Image (tube, rainbow, N blue to C red):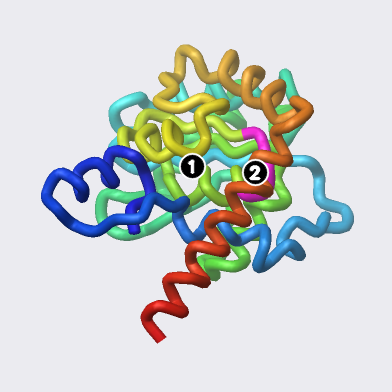
Amino acid sequence: MARDESSHKMATTIGAASVLSPDMVHSISVRHPDLAAPTRGCEPYFLFQANAQLIARVGEERIARSLAVIAAATKWRPAFFGAGTARHHDRADLYDGITAILRAFAPTVRPMGITTRNPMSLASYIAGSQLWVGSSLHGRIIASSFALPRVSLENLKVASYAATWDPDFPVNVAFDRLAESVAEAVTAAGSANSADVSRHIASVADESTAALVRDFL
């Protein structure tokens, strides 16, 4: 099973049997719709996630200022999300640095950190958010499954997947275009057919995964 068009074409080129299907994680809204249940008393928030390499390249101050612009425009609280903590993935100490800078020059912005490593709890934070901004593929996939606005930072793997299954929302976004891309994503999510498209892809992923399980059991 190939999850994007480029992988499917490569498999075909080498003569490997391949079925093009969305990533199985895309079915999460079908299997766990309860994850999107609102949390009582929780302020609206948007999620920010970036791997350590990206943060080092862009710089903590530039990221902090971009997040402050988004928070001011949307009135949503920024929440720092750790998609993975293996080497070269996300680092909480870098999020701490961005938070300190934010508090110094934008004291009215109250960022929060998400510390849980429970996979379903992490998914629930995405499902309950107003917006996903990040470099993680599966973060975007979960946001897409729940029909949320989503913006992907620079990541070729994410761009390849989105080109196949999620082309209407920004990908490979540089920080000088982040605020503009957030506005585009919010507008796209509010379009008449956006939620229907998300539900359809989630359903296709669920059916494909179920068929794969049946084939191997």
Residue 9 position, x and y percent, is 24, 41
Q: Amino acid at mark 2?
A: Ser
Residue nearer the viewer, 130 or 90: 130
What residue would you read off at disc 2?
198
Mark 2, Cα crowd under 10 Å, few <14 / some 14-19 / many 20+, is many
Residue at the extreme bottom? 217
Per the image, is 115 magenta? no
* Point 33% across, 53% down: residue: 2
Specify start and end residues of the magenta stretch as a single range: 145-149
Mark 1, Cα crowd under 10 Å, few <14 / some 14-19 / many 20+, is many
Residue 169 position, x and y percent, is 56, 27
With respect to residue 120, does 213 lie above or below? below
Task: Provide the major secondary structure of the magenta segment.
Answer: loop
- The quarter of the image holding the N terminus is bottom left
* Point 63% across, 25% down: residue: 185
Q: Amino acid at mark 1?
A: Gln
Q: Name the image quarter holding residue 148.
A: top right
Label number found at residue 49:
1
Residue nearer the viewer, 171 or 177: 171
